[in-house]
């Protein structure tokens, strides 16, 4: 299945609203941000393991990294949609800014 960033963002928002309703509306923007930080920490842990800097009972894999990055992206999409930010549009602007800044 192929979707644009904007479509993925809206899909995550629809799923989030259903889940959040079932949880009694407990996920506020503050909780979303703390979840982003938690997921970022999990990404860091996997990368640390993949790079050999952390001994672990369970070896880290690229599949684990893909899962953690996807978890992080989901929450980022939900937070962006909460604040009505179109990440698809903003991402293209950011890529363009990086190209101008670093490539010339």
Image: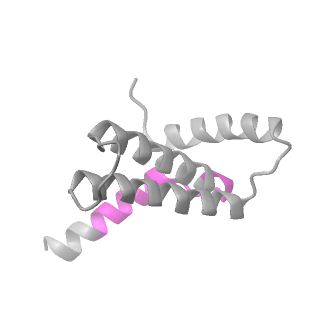
Query: In screen coordinates, is 10 left or right of 67?
Result: right
Q: Residue at x 50, y 54 (%)?
A: 39
Q: Residue furthest front?
A: 57
Q: Residue furthest top?
A: 1
In the rendered image, the quadrant that contains the N terminus is top left
- Vertical side of 102 occupied by 4: above or below: above
Q: Residue furthest left?
A: 103
Residue 61, image quadrant = top left
Question: Residue 86, image x and y in percent?
Answer: 53, 53
Q: Is residue 83 inside the magenta stretch?
A: yes
Q: Residue at x 86, y 43 (%)?
A: 24
- Vertical side of 3 occupied by 99: above or below: below
Give the camera-side residue of 82 and 62.
62
Question: Residue 65, image x and y in percent?
Answer: 34, 45
Question: Residue 9, image x and y in percent?
Answer: 54, 43
Question: Residue 99, image x and y in percent?
Answer: 21, 67
Magenta part of the protein: which range? 81-97
Query: In screen coordinates, is 70 left or right of 81?
Result: left
């Amino acid at each position: 299945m192929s979707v644009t960033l904007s479509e993925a963002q809206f899909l995550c928002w629809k799923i989030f609203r259903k889940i959040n309703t079932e949880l009694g509306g407990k996920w506020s923007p503050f909780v979303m941000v703390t979840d982003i930080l938690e997921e970022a920490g999990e990404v860091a842990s996997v990368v640390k393991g993949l790079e050999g800097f952390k001994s672990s009972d369970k070896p880290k894999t690229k599949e684990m990294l893909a899962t953690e990055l996807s978890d992080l992206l989901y929450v980022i999409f939900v937070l962006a949609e909460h604040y009505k930010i179109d990440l698809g549009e903003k991402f293209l602007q950011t890529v363009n800014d990086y190209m101008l800044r670093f490539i010339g």
